[in-house]
Amino acid sequence: MIHVENLTRYYGDFCAVDNIDLDVRKGEITGLLGPNGAGKTTTLRMLTGYLAPTSGTISIKDYSIDDDLLEIKKLIGYLPESAPLYHNMLVYDYLDYIADIRGLSKGRKEERIQELADLCDLRAIMHRPIGELSKGLRQRVGLAHAMIEDPEILILDEPTSGLDPNQIAEIRDIIRHFGREKTVILSTHILSEAEATCDRIVIIDKGRIVADGSTEALEQESTAQEKIITVALLKADFASASMRFRLLPGVTGIELVESADPEVLKLKISADGRDNLREMIYSCIKETDWVLLELAKETKSLENIFRELTKEG
């Protein structure tokens, strides 16, 4: 559906997007996840044709953004982070106006406005001025704007930024409904939102893609590369335990963890991806008079992965 190759964008001497390759399939909700300033908004603006790349190519369906920009824009509904709404207009009048701009016929226009009134839960506010609405309601109007022509692709920049948990859940439901048959790309720096909404997560940092896959795939890949084992012991001290465990094959680090019980020694042992680390730790403990209270493998969360991939340095 969308093919991006070697996409790069400079602002003067600053490289905001650095040689990105990306393919997005139809019927997929893809989340661009990254810290502020990572290049997410710049990437979305180039995908929508609102910003020209410094270099690289963007193809959507059979169209090139260099040669068929108008045709590509007809395929896309776009909601920037700050929805460009006319605050003095009534919600219905605004959607009617946008439908006229997008060239919907009179019959189709009214039909589509009513469909979006239901989908975005706008019926109770259709005759209220946009400027009187809460941010969450304005965001729903912005989504209706982006979907007015029933586009094949929906691109959303930070669609839940600044919303409360109830409003976030409402926007998430709308995105999921639209994404059943269409293509959705959204940017966010909210990890839980990406995890709950997206089929696929692309983590971007300093203009580069540093990870790409489903949440489950990213977690499995990270866990395969590194194991973290939590150990809790009685009758053990950190110096002795650390010395013994560091001799085990594959161990790369040992961290002392604060314990609620001062008599309990709690450690996090990091190692490479070998599968038998817990067995080796258990055998090592059996050779001592230590009492084993806990021996568990820790699964990395999306938050752990995100922090490792985007932390400074």
Image (spheres, helix red, strand yellow):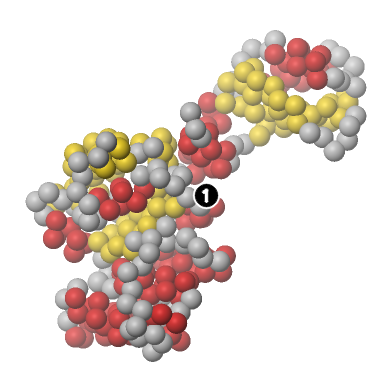
Q: How many marks?
A: 1
Is 22 on the left or on the right of 224, as rendered? left
Quarter where residue 289 is shown: top right
Is 79 on the left or on the right of 203, as rendered? left
Q: Is residue 254 above or below residue 257?
A: above
Residue 80: x and y in percent read 34, 61
**Residue at x 66% of width, y 34% of height:** 298
Residue 44: x and y in percent read 30, 52
Q: Is residue 68 above or below residue 206?
A: below
Q: Secondary structure at mark 1?
A: helix
Pick out the residue farthest to the bottom. 127
Residue 20 in view here: no
**Residue at x 30% of width, y 47% of height:** 43
**Residue at x 39% of width, y 89% of height:** 127
In the rendered structure, which amino acid carries the disc numbered 1? Leu
Residue 309 in view here: yes
Instruction: Pick whichever, 87 or 291, lies toward us.
Output: 87
Pick out the residue farthest to the left. 67
**Residue at x 28% of width, y 73% of height:** 148
Quarter where residue 117 is shown: bottom left
Q: Is residue 266 above or below residue 4?
A: above
Instruction: Pick whichever, 293 or 194, lies toward us.
Output: 194
Is 145 on the left or on the right of 232, as rendered? left
Residue 299: x and y in percent read 62, 36
Q: Is residue 285 above or below residue 153?
A: above
Within 10 Å of the Cα at label 1, are there few (<14), some (14-19), or many (20+) other Cα atoms? some
Residue 180: x and y in percent read 38, 62
Instruction: Pick whichever, 273 or 15, lies toward us.
Output: 15
Quarter where residue 212 is shown: top left
The residue beneath circle 1 is 191
